[in-house]
Image: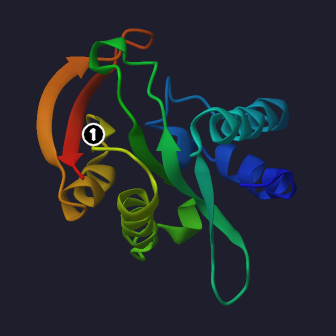
Amino acid sequence: MRSDDLDGFAAINAQPEVMRYIHDGRTLDRAATAERLANSQRQWDKHGFGLYAVEVRETGELAGFTGLAVPTFLPEIMPAVEIGWRLGRAHWGRGLATEAAQAVVAHTRAALDLRRLVSIHVVGNEASARVMVKLGMSLERETVQPDTGRQVRVYAMDL
């Protein structure tokens, strides 16, 4: 993702339905979204991976993102690299999350020296869990996210 994705990303992060299962469920304003984009760039600089913009092929519209991050919010699974995604509500149900995540997995296998990926499923977000299963991930454990108290399931796959 690039700095010029800020407006589209901020619009996605302002959607309550989209953010319902993200962190504590609150929407993000433009400033918080800008910090997320800056953090993504720091991830790229530090680890050589981060978030990829997901764009609608026909229009170039930002649909959301998929990518890799270090899930420090769940210390019990560290060290780990998480694959995740977030799409604007208008882009749900079209297979974009699965298609984009499959491309990230393929790129990870081909270009990164990682042996394993995890994905964190907030209980209730069944659409996201279906993407994890389609990627070939398996349920590894159930736990609670310490900073929010939310029940989560950790899915994992070897690469």
Type of colouring: rainbow
> Which sits in the foreground, 64 or 159?
159
Indicate the position of residue 109 as horizontal and vertical percent values. Answer: 35, 59
Q: Quadrant of residue 37?
A: top right
Name which residue type carries label 1: Gly
Give the left or right position of residue 115, taking residue 29 as reference.
left
Against 119, residue 150 (above or below) is: above
> Which sits in the foreground, 89 or 110?
110
Indicate the position of residue 148 as horizontal and vertical percent values. Answer: 43, 14
Residue 87 in sight: no
Residue 114 in sight: yes
Disc 1 marks which residue? 124
Q: Which residue: 47% across, 30% down? A: 70
Q: Quadrant of residue 75?
A: top left
Indicate the position of residue 36 as horizontal and vertical percent values. Answer: 70, 35
Q: Which residue: 34% across, 19% down? A: 78
Give the left or right position of residue 155, taking residue 61 as reference.
left
Q: Which residue: 63% across, 47% down? A: 15
Q: Residues within 10 Å of mark 1 (few under 14, many from 20)?
A: few
Q: Which residue: 42% across, 77% down? A: 94
Against 145, residue 14 (above or below) is: below
Give the left or right position of residue 41, taking residue 63 as reference.
right
Q: Secondary structure at mark 1?
A: loop
Against 62, residue 123 (above or below) is: above
> Which sits in the foreground, 112 or 87?
112
Give the left or right position of residue 31, taking residue 106 as reference.
right
